[in-house]
Image: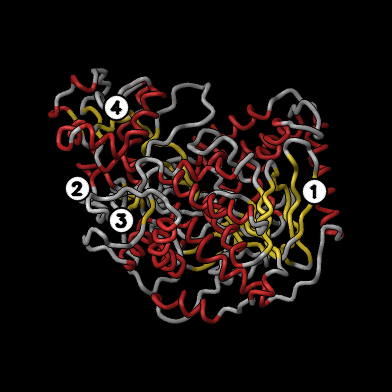
């Protein structure tokens, strides 16, 4: 069993982070130049961490499998970033942001981590403004805010409908400055395939160059994984097609605990599936729910055009069911409500898998130009994809897999159960509990990279006696050979099925049995189907070409192999958790259609430990202790 010490500082909640920073060991400026840090990933968490660590004086090596960090999936977080600035003077505060985030996560997140996130939110905005991020502003020049799901205050800062892209450009500019100063060595087209552990500490990684096939290893004093989430285990998701779990999964198999893998988020405002040809889904930002009203016809199988359905025959179901929050109910609740309406035969569009998101009232009230100013690029994107004009008719939306709250277990210092291996952003589990509130992913990624890791990695380096290690060490050679052996194994199968066919089949199993609604019977069935799929994968996979050059089938084979194993762990975790909370909705555990938690038995972090190939993983439990909030039934009515 693992020792899951969260290392939460003592003292009042409001003072924990400040006291902890003061008690940390420091590395003096001259000594920082003697230490090296590897950062894998250059989205918001990775780019901000790499830039900041380099700015402090550390030698940083940053690895991405893209041609540039600007392709990181962080750009897809369009709607905004939360911060408790209270510019609107509408009652917001750090304490309220903390509570909204804890409640939004259905009381399944650590108090101390979430409070620190709320504290740091105010610093993030200042940092990004200083970098030139073009946040929207009010007429008088102050930064503008809008509302997001799960909150009754306006605390979301935004740059039209492209906030993630603008924030990434800010972090990217800071990163490229360090690249130019030779503080960061940038490695593009390099995919991490293993983490190297020496004497119990993470000391480097093994990568494969996606253009040449060359396998190399890289040593450092500390390693940061900032590689995003694993939503593509479902095949169809809002994630970029290249997004995968390989870095975190390989770390899991080297000893890093994987926490709460069943906590996946379904986003309510996505363009519906249009056919079997699709390889990904498109997210329409949650910010649209500020001005768009969600509805379906009252009558079942009503095929009339939206404009032909009078107000008296429309069901604005979120406003009806959740009058306090209305269309800004949290994502998990809004998604299940949409599914319920479609399951009742009142869905719209092909197959009845859609609900309307209607802007007619907002356009009438505010004018088309104001709506275009707020959401113009989103409206244009919707029209290009659907050939429908959302200014003239409602958007059609349906829930889709979006974000993963689970990830590698980390302590308060963002260090995994492997000493020296730190995990940031969506790749860790720490801040969102069972459901992520909108506009908090960007907040977490930048808080981790700009303001947490620079302190905690320094504390680790200063407090750990690290032997000199380079990539000639036996552990590096062994890790390289393991990667080469797996590459050869993929190429030697010479079966008849493509990688994509296995990925699609896995996605169907996961969506049907571990998607928006889960049952004991369905999860048990999935735990039979996935091992059978895995067996066929390793006996009937076809990977053409060689490993010595660009080979996308080979890349995907490794990623899908990891997804298959992760999918099994997700179903195991979902079966073990006999309650409904946030994005984890077990049909057997509900009350009046709402999620029913079991705090007596399940107020813990489920941290799974790899037990070896073919062996059942070990469940470790970190109890969640709430000293500052009252555990209550989450209600948005």
Residue bearing mark 4: 390
Q: Residue at x 23, y 45 (%)?
A: 326
- Mark closer to the chain start, 4 or 1: 1
Residue 251, how many percent across, how many down? 68, 55
Secondary structure beneath dot 2 equals loop
Query: The residue tagged with tag 1: helix, strand or loop?
Result: strand
Residue 590: image location, x then y, percent: 35, 49
Q: Which residue is mark 2?
A: 323
- Element type where label 4 sits in the image: loop
In the rendering, which numbered label is found on residue 559? Answer: none
Q: CA distance from mark 2 to mark 1?
A: 57 Å
Residue 435 % position (x, y): 42, 52
Callout 2: 10 Å neighbours few (<14), some, many (20+)? some
Q: CA distance from mark 4 to mark 1?
A: 50 Å
Q: Quadrant of the N terminus?
A: bottom right
Q: Which mark is residue 155?
A: 3
Proximity of marks 2 and 1: CB atoms separated by less than 8 Å = no
Viewer-nearest of labels 2 and 4?
4
Position of 237 compared to 257: left or right? Answer: left
The residue at 69%/51% (across/down) is 250
Visible residue check, residue 291? yes
Alpha carbons under labels 3 and 2: distance apart: 20 Å
Residue 622 placement (x, y as % from top left): 53, 67
Q: Secondary structure at mark 3?
A: loop
Mark earlier in primary sequence (3, 4): 3
Q: Earlier in the sequence, mark 2 or mark 4?
A: 2
Residue bearing mark 1? 216
User: Callout 3: few (<14), some (14-19), or many (20+) C-alpha neighbours within 10 Å?
Assistant: many
């Amino acid at each position: 069993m693992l020792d899951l010490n969260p290392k939460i500082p003592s003292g009042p909640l409001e003072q924990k982070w400040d006291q902890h920073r003061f008690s940390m060991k420091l590395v003096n400026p001259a000594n920082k130049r003697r230490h090296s840090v590897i950062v894998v990933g250059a989205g918001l968490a990775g780019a901000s961490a790499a830039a900041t660590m380099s700015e402090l004086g550390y030698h940083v090596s940053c690895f991405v499998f893209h041609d540039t960090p600007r392709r990181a999936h962080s750009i897809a977080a369009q709607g905004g970033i939360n911060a408790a600035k209270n510019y609107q003077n509408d009652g917001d505060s750090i304490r309220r942001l903390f509570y909204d985030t804890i409640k939004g996560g259905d009381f399944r997140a650590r108090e101390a981590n979430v409070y620190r996130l709320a504290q740091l939110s105010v610093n993030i905005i200042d940092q990004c403004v200083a970098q030139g991020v073009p946040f929207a502003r009010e007429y008088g020049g102050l930064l503008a805010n809008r509302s997001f799901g799960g909150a009754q205050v306006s605390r979301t800062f935004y740059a039209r409908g492209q906030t993630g892209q603008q924030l990434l450009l800010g972090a990217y500019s800071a990163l490229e400055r360090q690249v130019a100063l030779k503080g960061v060595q940038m490695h593009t087209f390099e995919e991490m395939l293993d983490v190297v552990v020496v004497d119990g500490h993470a000391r480097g990684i093994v990568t494969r160059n996606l253009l040449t096939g060359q396998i190399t290893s890289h040593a450092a004093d500390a390693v940061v994984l900032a590689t995003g989430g694993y939503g593509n285990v479902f095949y169809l998701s809002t994630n970029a097609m290249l997004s995968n779990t390989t870095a975190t999964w390989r770390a899991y198999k080297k000893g890093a605990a994987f926490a709460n893998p069943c906590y996946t988020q379904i986003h309510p405002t996505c363009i519906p599936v249009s056919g079997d040809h699709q390889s990904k889904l498109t997210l329409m930002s949650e910010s649209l729910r500020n001005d768009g009203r969600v509805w379906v016809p009252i009558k079942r199988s009503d095929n009339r055009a939206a404009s032909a359905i009078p107000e008296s025959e429309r069901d604005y179901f979120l406003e009806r069911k959740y009058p306090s929050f209305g269309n800004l109910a949290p994502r998990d609740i809004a998604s299940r409500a949409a599914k319920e309406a479609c399951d009742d035969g009142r869905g719209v569009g092909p197959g009845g898998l859609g609900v309307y998101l209607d802007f007619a009232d907002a356009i009438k009230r505010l004018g088309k130009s104001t709506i275009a100013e707020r959401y113009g690029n989103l409206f244009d994107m919707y029209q290009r994809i659907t050939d429908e004009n959302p200014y003239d008719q409602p958007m059609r939306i349906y829930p889709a897999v979006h974000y993963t709250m689970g990830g590698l277990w980390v302590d308060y210092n963002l260090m995994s159960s492997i000493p020296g291996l730190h995990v940031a952003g969506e790749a860790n589990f720490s801040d969102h509990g069972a459901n992520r509130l909108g506009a908090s992913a960007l907040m977490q990624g930048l808080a981790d990279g700009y303001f947490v890791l620079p302190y905690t990695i320094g504390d680790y380096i200063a407090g750990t006696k690290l032997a000199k290690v380079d990539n000639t060490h036996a552990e590096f050679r062994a890790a390289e050979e393991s990667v080469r052996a797996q590459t050869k194994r993929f190429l030697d199968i010479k079966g008849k099925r493509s990688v994509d066919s296995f990925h699609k089949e896995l996605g169907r199993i996961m969506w049907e049995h571990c998607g928006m609604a889960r049952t004991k019977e369905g999860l048990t069935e999935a735990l039979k189907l996935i091992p059978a799929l895995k067996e066929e994968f390793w006996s009937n996979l076809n990977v053409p070409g060689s490993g010595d050059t660009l080979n996308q089938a080979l890349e995907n084979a490794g990623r899908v192999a990891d997804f298959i194993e992760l999918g099994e762990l997700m179903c195991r975790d979902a079966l073990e958790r006999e309650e409904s909370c946030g994005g984890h909705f077990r049909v057997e555990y509900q009350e009046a259609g709402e999620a029913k938690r079991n705090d007596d038995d399940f107020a813990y972090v489920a941290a799974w430990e790899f037990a070896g190939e073919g062996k059942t993983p070990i469940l470790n439990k970190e109890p969640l202790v709430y000293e500052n909030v009252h555990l209550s039934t989450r209600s948005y009515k």
